[in-house]
Image: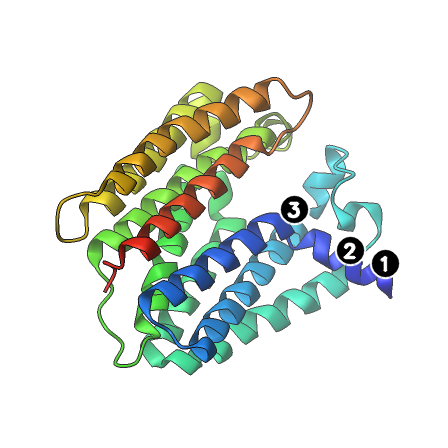
Amino acid sequence: MSTRVLGLVRASHPEPAAAVTVVAALLAAGVGHSVAGVAAVALTVLASQLAVGWSNDLIDADRDAAVGRTDKPVTTGEVARPTLARATAVAAVAVPVLALAGGLAAAACATLGLVSALLYNRPLKSTPVSVLPYAVSFGALPAFVVLALPGSPVPPAWLVAAAALLGAGAHFANVLPDLADDARTGVRGLPHRLGPVGSRLAAAGLLLAATVALVLGPPGPPSWTGLSAVAAAVAVPAVGWYAGRATAGRSATAFRAVLVVALIDVVLLVSSGRVV
């Protein structure tokens, strides 16, 4: 049983799942949710992340086996495919149920984000529009957090746009370590068509654009903290990608750089107090 539970945790893509959940909780606290509201947002986002991660490993099981991915619990036998399928279904159903604590509009937005991410796993991952689900799902995250507030206020357009840009950048960074394996198994999403250099440039530009949107979007002049965040959005990905090149084999440093930029952006938002 302990091996199965550990396998499910590993199959959930725990690092990004935890990071996105923490970011959502921080944003919820920053926009004024109560303790119960922050908990409801965090549980909803965690369930969504689990459903997406488990679905991804389930769908990609044959591909991962073909390229010898020993870091995938399904390919090593730690988790059986039926177990992973049941876990995915339970987590997916939990998302709209948990999101209803914030109202129908919030639940609809959370469900949109989940469905978009699942559509990336199949069939959009291997198409030229592979970036679209990332943009939609990331954009839906702050929209859900804001809509879940009492009265369901309208999410600011600049906030949704910044999150969508961040998600699009995350897509290019996330695929970088898998470009060679994906090519062997026929995956041809937008990053694969642009290649490693094009994907790095796209990721860097989108992350910078996301941070600029967060600095310039709220009313009032940009702060020195915001301008510092823009500088970090330039420096952190560059350092991450340089470190990744110095690491043999697959490296997740580029995607970790995205997570760092996302955390910086959320801290910027929370500290500014200019979200809604």
Left or right for 168, reference 220: right
Q: Is residue 122 visible?
A: no
Give the structural element (helix, strand or loop) at label 3. loop
Q: Is residue 28 visible?
A: yes
List the residue tagged with mark 2: 7
Quarter of the image containing the N terminus? bottom right
Residue 60 is tagged as: 3
Work out how far the residue at label 1 is from the one at label 2, CA to CA, in angstroms: 6 Å
In this rendering, the answer to whether 29 lies above or below 120 is below
Q: Position of residue 222 (x, y in %)?
A: 18, 43
List the residue tagged with mark 1: 3
In depth, the one of 9 and 133 nearer the eye is 9
Residue under the point 13% across and 53% down? 219
In this rendering, the answer to whether 191 lies above or below 111 is above
Give the structural element (helix, strand or loop) at label 2. helix
Name the residue type under label 2: Gly
Work out how far the residue at label 2 is from the one at label 3, CA to CA, in angstroms: 16 Å
